[in-house]
Image (cartoon, helix red, strand yellow):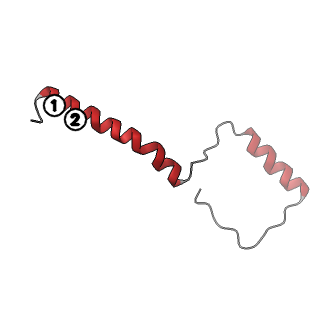
């Protein structure tokens, strides 16, 4: 996500490309985060539900009037 930016295009040989491709395929769980708008769209409903649950819980307990 925040890797180093390449300065210009580096040309890879076919062997290097195949090695990189094979190494990527071996990784079972690759971390590929979503872009920030997608994270925001997924996170907002979860945050709202947590807030509603906490308000309900505190209201039942009598902490909130």
Is 50 situated above or below 7?
Answer: above
Is 50 situated above or below 11?
Answer: above
Mark 1–mark 2 CB contact (< 8 Å): yes
Report the disc number at residue 55: 2
Q: Is residue 46 left or right of residue 4?
A: left
**Which corner quadrant holds the N terminus?**
bottom right
Report the disc number at residue 59: 1
Q: Residue furthest bottom?
A: 8
Q: Position of residue 44 (x, y in %)?
A: 40, 45
Disc 1 from disc 2: Cα separation? 6 Å
Helix, strand or loop for disc 1: helix
Within-10-Å neighbours for mark 1: few <14, some 14–19, many 20+: few
46 or 20: which is nearer to us?
46
Q: Quadrant of residue 54?
A: top left
Q: Is residue 55 left or right of residue 1?
A: left
11 or 51: which is nearer to us?
51
């Amino acid at each position: 996500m925040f890797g180093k930016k390449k300065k210009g295009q580096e040309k890879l040989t076919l062997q290097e490309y195949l090695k990189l491709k094979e190494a990527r395929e071996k990784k079972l769980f690759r971390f590929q985060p979503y872009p920030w708008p997608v994270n925001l769209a997924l996170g907002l409903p979860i945050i709202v539900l947590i807030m509603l649950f906490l308000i309900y819980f505190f209201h039942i307990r009598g902490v909130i009037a």
